[in-house]
Amino acid sequence: MNDDEINHMFKVSWTTMLSLYDRLKLKEKLKLVALEEDWTLSPGADIMAITLGIEYLIRAVKDVLRKFQRTLIEKDEICTYKIVGRINTSQLMKFYPIAIPCKRVILSEKNIPNLFVVATLIQIRNTLLKEVRRLKRHGELKPISEILISKLSEVIHVCDLMLSDPLLKPLLREAEVISRSKEKIYVLENELINEIQKKPRELKPYRILLDEKRRLLEGVHLLTNNVNTLNSLANKYGINIIGWKLYEIYCFTLLLEQLLNLLTESGKSVECDLFDGKILFIKSGNLEITISYNALIENVKDRIKTARAYGILDSEISELLERLGCLPDTLIRVRKSTHEKLIVIDYKWTRDISYITTARFKGLAYLYELNANFSAIITPPPSFSEEYLKSKEIDEEIQKNKPFYHKILMHGGVIIWLDGNERDRILALAYIDPKEESLQKNKKVMNRLARLILE
């Protein structure tokens, strides 16, 4: 596995999971088992949730701009050529006949709520600019730093666009002064809270913006002030995850994304819950889906556990079977009003044709041992170069099956109905290549598997 593949898999896995976390509205930590230490995605003020917080903040700013507050101000003016507004009779004798004093009513954008919006945009923009500069100095943290820099740069651009709005321009100078001082920001926020208490309905978007701003800055504060955080993040998510484990997570996130896309296509609401961080419950209409990653689903029966065993030379030893069993990478149980089915998926990081053939037998074994309806083995496309094949020991069976695995390359894999036209037993072998140029094809392959799962 080369660096480009590692960077691609990490980037896709992380950004996809963040997006799914937002779409599923999960409130608990999602744990993806990664050897000794889980890969944990957490809501709240967590480093990996900063990008989500940014999106929420920008959304809140846009809501505020739709209900931008303007104040009516009566302004005194001395008119010489034409009367503007109404005549100020109390001051008339001072200026007449050279000029006429008038009171003019104008709309002003300058008020506490609007000052807070502009100061917030400036504060967030300046804070993120500092963070981008700091991340660029940590070249050893790729691909983590690259993803963060890309996300933060997008937000800085959005802030710049918003600050160029003609409505906000008159407030820039004063808001810039406020954003440089923590004390002035604190005073402005308290004044805004007082205004919100007086007009809660009108200023509700400003209240949401205040909450999102505080939440985001807490997360950025963690990222900025704890130097060791990024290093530990790099070790945890970039360096210490072995290649085959990262491949598992990559495939799992792609599959989860396609399942959710198909569920939302129908227009029905999707409810989601998380158990122990490893088992996902999704409900949509009369459909209930349970998805696990490296964890067993309750009430999934293993034939081995209920079997009987005897020593070849002596008596029954069935109690030893408790120590025997399987743990597939992904288990999916789909329940509809009329039926239920079990899907078993294993991800294998290998291009070795011998190992892929062995994995096919494992997929068949899962169908029997767990009494599953659908078993899928997902691997990168095998290598058929003469140099590679010469370096491997290939027996007669592998040599005979090699053309089959080569032919299905152009089809993205194969789906085998083991009972002819019946769909009670399906075995699939899917090729998912962890390369950036293969991403769209990978999504199509996963979409096909997802459709089979939901049928």
Image: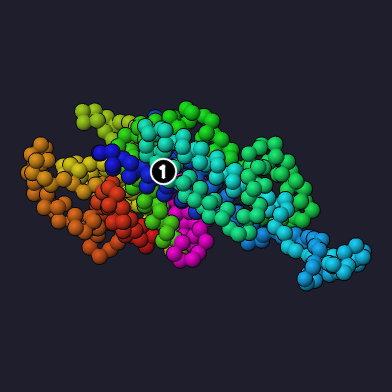
The residue at the point 34 percent across, 58 percent down is 447
Using the image as rendered, state which of residue 21 and residue 118 is in the foreground: 118
- Per the image, the residue denoted by label 1 is 147
Q: Is residue 191 left or right of residue 434?
A: right
The residue at the point 28 percent across, 42 percent down is 4
* Rendered view: 447 above or below 222: below
The total of numbered circles placed on residues is: 1
Crowding at mark 1 (Cα within 10 Å: few <14, some 14-19, many 20+) = some
> The N terminus is located in which quarter?
top left
Position in image of residue 273 (x %, y %): 52, 49
Q: In the picture, residue 247 is in which quadrant?
A: top left
Colour style of the rendered protein structure: rainbow
Inspect this view and state whether residue 342 appears.
yes
Position in image of residue 126 (x %, y %): 55, 42
Q: Does dot 1 land on a helix, a strand or a loop?
A: helix
The residue at the point 65 percent across, 55 percent down is 170
Q: Is residue 227 left or right of residue 304?
A: right
Q: Which residues are magenta?
A: 264-291
Q: Residue furthest bottom?
A: 82
The residue at the point 44 percent across, 60 percent down is 263
